[in-house]
Amino acid sequence: MLVNTGQSLSSLLRQAQEVRRRNFPAAVQFDRPLATRAVSVTGRHCALNCAHCGGHFLRGMLSPAELENALAGRAAGTQNAAGGHGPEPPAGGPAAAGWRSLLVSGGCDRQGRVPVTEHPALLAEWKQNFRMNFHPGLVDEETARVIGQYADAVSFDFIIDDETIREVLGLDKTGADYIRSYRALRRHARVYPHLVIGLRGGGLAGEYDALEALRELGVDGLVLIVFFPVAGTRYAGRRPPDIEEAAAFIATARIMFPQMPLYLGCMRPRGRYRAQLDVLALQAGVNKIVLPARPAVEYARESGWRVDYGEECCVLS
């Protein structure tokens, strides 16, 4: 199969493997981010109803009030363990005892912004207990500055294809708006752009252009995720991108950014697709995989690589 570079997948993989070998040790990290808890500052509300998400992923996040209750339970549990006589901890307290970091996210407004900085007192409180990864959407300079006061990392969805922005997100924005936001965030925080392979309903549209833009803008680390259909969304009937096409893109990213940490993030298809893609991603030169399929773990061990494990968001661990 050929990609836009004119190279076959096998050729790209060989080149990517050599790039990785020259620039990184024979090691890989597998993350199971149970120590990071996602919190949505908007609860389950999102004004956009994006074609690929439809608010689905907000349902697994805590609201700020739910997080506060969980933290109260953790504090009560600690007091009781120390011999105190406090009340029984609220539900969720014991689980909260294992959290070390937060993903601060939420739904977007009609301008593509997530109001992650609207409650600075809460952010200051959370910062005392956790490291924080922010997922802010589009930002202006002041929002980026405030985020920088609290963020240990920023996960930024980097989209520069105008038609994809209109079709998928329904936003009256352009790639230039995402580039401006990315630049602003980089002035104040450590930013890990996220590229969704096949975001426009499973087809690649602008992803390679996004890599070129990032090469010009500069990047500290890149997270690649892969579209998959979600029930109840406008893209529910679509399919993930071809596995070889996704692998070719990953290999191209490694070749273009030889010394940059490259991660395969948590959002990607499961089952047989994941089992095949994860092995190809290792062959394509990724440094880290979140929630790896068993064949990928076996491949790394059989290859003689050192295998490390992380328990937080990939940009934090």
Image (spheres, rainbow, N blue to C red):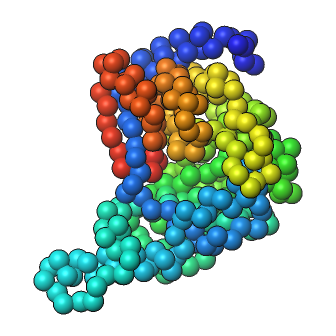
Residue 308, above or below 110 = above
Q: How many marks?
A: 0
Q: Is residue 134 left or right of residue 34?
A: right
On screen, residue 172 versus residue 46, left or right, reads right
Judge whether residue 35 can be spotted in this image: yes
Residue 157: image x %, image y %? Answer: 65, 49
Q: Residue furthest toward the left?
A: 83
- Where's residue 218, x and y in %? 60, 39
- Of 282 and 133, which appears nearest the observer? 282
Q: Nearer the viewer, residue 40 or 228?
A: 228
Q: Which corner quadrant holds the N terminus?
A: top right
Residue 180 vs residue 92, the one in the foreground: 92
Residue 184 lies left or right of residue 288; in this view the side is right
Residue at position x 53%, y 42% in the image: 265
Where is residue 289 drawn, in percent x and y? 46, 36
Occupied quadrant, residue 68: bottom left
Snapshot quadrant of residue 102: bottom left
Question: As displayed, is residue 299 above or below residue 240?
Answer: above
In this rendering, the answer to whether 32 lies above or below 94 is above
Q: Residue at x 60, y 39 (%)?
A: 269
In this rendering, the answer to whether 184 lies above or below 198 is: below
Say left or right for 250 vs 127.
right
Residue drawn at x 41%, y 31% is 294
The residue at the point 41 percent across, 51 percent down is 33
Q: Is residue 19 visible?
A: no
Task: Give how far across and how far down residue 55 sits, in percent.
Answer: 69, 61
